[in-house]
């Protein structure tokens, strides 16, 4: 009988702990919701141009915050469905790849000399 009483006590303590955790999660969810609703709408965000900063490491720099983001498997931010800077949240509105532009310029000059 004593073992059953002890088991019931542990059950009640566990149930109270679950309630406490649930209340804490609800409070955190409410705080997060308030924070998200306080963020500016998308159209008020700053616009960023992501510029490729290295020909070989596929690093791209944000024009708003200056932080760089490396795309491990290459490509451009738009090819990876990046719409916002992962550091400052600015909307990526354009990409500039000076290395591709240089190649295009070289091709144009070589075509005109033929």
Image (cartoon, rainbow, N blue to C red):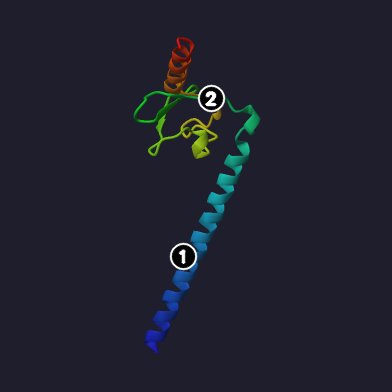
- Circle 2 Cα neighbour tier, 10 Å, few/some/many (<14 / 14–19 / ≥20): many
Q: Residue at (53%, 60%) from the top-left corner? A: 22
For image coordinates 45% across by 23% down, the residue present is 100
Q: Is residue 36 left or right of residue 13?
A: right
Q: Nearer the viewer, residue 10 or 77?
A: 77
Distance between mark 1 and mark 2 Cα atoms = 47 Å
Q: Dividing the image into 4 quarters, which one contains the C terminus?
A: top left
Work out whether residue 9 or residue 42 is closer to the camera in this orientation and state it.
Answer: 42
How many numbered circles are shown?
2
Q: Which mark is residue 96?
A: none
Say if 67 sits above or below 15 in the image: above
* Mark 1, other Cα within 10 Å: few <14 / some 14–19 / many ≥20: few
Q: Residue furthest left?
A: 56
Which one is in front in this view, the residue at disc 1 or the one at disc 2? 2
Q: Position of residue 45 (x, y in %)?
A: 59, 28
Judging by the rendered image, the residue that carries numbered circle 2 is 48
Q: SS of the residue at dot 2?
A: strand
Residue 11 x, y percent position in the rendering: 45, 75
The residue lying toward the viewer, choosing from 9 and 85, is 85
Rendered residue at 44%/70% (across/down): 14
Identify the residue position indicated by label 1 in the image: 17
**SS of the residue under disc 1:** helix
Residue 38 position in % (x across, y down): 61, 36
Quadrant location of residue 61?
top left
83 shown above or below 63: below
49 lies left or right of 38: left
- Please provide percent x and percent y for residue 107: 45, 18
């Amino acid at each position: 009988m004593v073992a059953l009483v002890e088991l019931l006590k542990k059950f009640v303590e566990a149930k109270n702990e679950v309630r406490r955790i649930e209340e804490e999660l609800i409070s955190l969810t409410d705080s997060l919701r308030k924070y998200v609703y306080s963020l500016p709408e998308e159209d008020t965000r700053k616009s960023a141009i992501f510029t490729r900063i290295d020909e070989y490491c596929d690093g791209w720099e944000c024009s708003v915050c200056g932080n760089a983001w490396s795309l491990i498997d290459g490509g451009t931010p738009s090819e990876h469905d990046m719409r916002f800077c992962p550091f400052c949240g600015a909307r990526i509105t354009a990409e500039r790849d000076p290395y591709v532009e240089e190649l295009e310029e070289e091709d144009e000059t070589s075509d005109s000399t033929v």
